[in-house]
Image: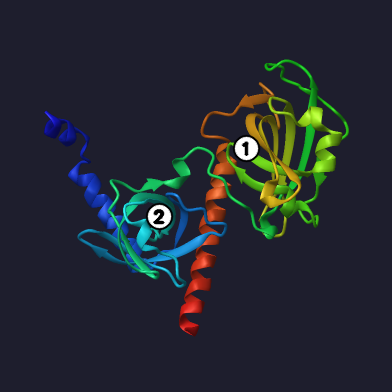
Amino acid sequence: MLKKIGDFFKPKDEQREATLALLAACVRQRAVCRVDYVEGIKEKEKKYLFPVELLDEGLALESRTPFFSMDWLGKAITFLMVVKGGPARPSKLYRFVSEINSVEGPFRACVSTPLELIPAERRQSVRIALQVRHMPSLAIWAVTDGDEGENTPKVDPAPLINLRHDAKDIPSVLLNLSSGGLRAAFSREQFELRGDALRAGSRVVVQLVFSSKAFSQAYPFIILGKIRNVLFGVDGKDRVGVGIQFMALRRPEGKPAWVPVNKTGIERIGRLINILQIEYYREAKRRLERLSSKN
């Protein structure tokens, strides 16, 4: 009986072959893998690895600096990798979920072949820390009146945040962005002054405008959001992080004026984030390759 249940959950041969083909492409392309999570390990900085060999027991990974530990055997690991497409197919970002099955030393380990590689753009609310050149202008207003279903929420005319994309403080204020929301940081003084408007459950209107020289055109968004959580001591500093979930997107014309945001977030922001993620991975790969050539 147990064997039959196990057989039921096994991936199809086609799925496994497709996964192996993707992993082989990663090895050929020397794709960059960014570690997101190692079970029981807290890494403050993002770590990048190279897939170097596809073995019977899994995928061999190497680090340019000491990283792996013998204590990690059997630990779960998650990382992201970019796989280049063909001439008519764009590059794709994949999420790799597996476990470490062998450690040869601090520079090399092997992870089990996963059941599948998950396209990262299908995940809900993939968060990204934007680089300075891609920062949007950011304004946030507190909603002062109107029920959950009102089409035109009334806002406090004094914004909670109002920063241009080239403002010196914008990188330290907009901590991350996803298709489903963002996290903004306030000083303790700002939070205490406007604390009623920044408590969990409060509604806000967010304006994001991507218009720096890095973009060929402007991408404006006006979004109705709800504060879902408030975290004190962000980045180990005396700042307060406010997590905002996107609830509805303002249409530039037509009715209804506000379109509800589904569980996958705002599609245009999601596409933009995916493009930037791939660009950041390519830059990281070039930096690692330059480091390797010097060594």
User: Which residue is most to the bottom?
Assistant: 294
Against 276, residue 197 (above or below) is above
Screen quadrant of the N terminus: top left
Name the residue type under label 2: Arg
Against 225, residue 133 (above or below) is below
Residue ID for mark 1: 181
* Residue 66: percent from left, percent from top: 45, 70
Marks 1 and 2, the one that precedes in the sequence: 2
**Residue depicted at x 88% and y 31%:** 157
Report whether residue 270 is seen. yes
| Spatial CA span between label 1 and label 2 | 29 Å
* Residue 258: percent from left, percent from top: 67, 25
Against 289, residue 83 (above or below) is above
Q: Which mark is residue 89?
A: 2
Task: Give the quadrant of residue 80.
Answer: bottom left
Q: Nearer the viewer, mark 1 or mark 2?
A: 1
**Residue depicted at x 48% and y 68%:** 285
Q: Which mark is residue 126?
A: none
Report whether residue 91 is seen. no
Does 180 sit left or right of 114 as displayed?
A: right
Name the residue type under label 1: Gly
**Residue depicted at x 63% and y 47%:** 176
Does 34 sit left or right of 276 as displayed?
A: left
Label 2 crowding class (10 Å Cα cut-off): few <14, some 14-19, many 20+?
few
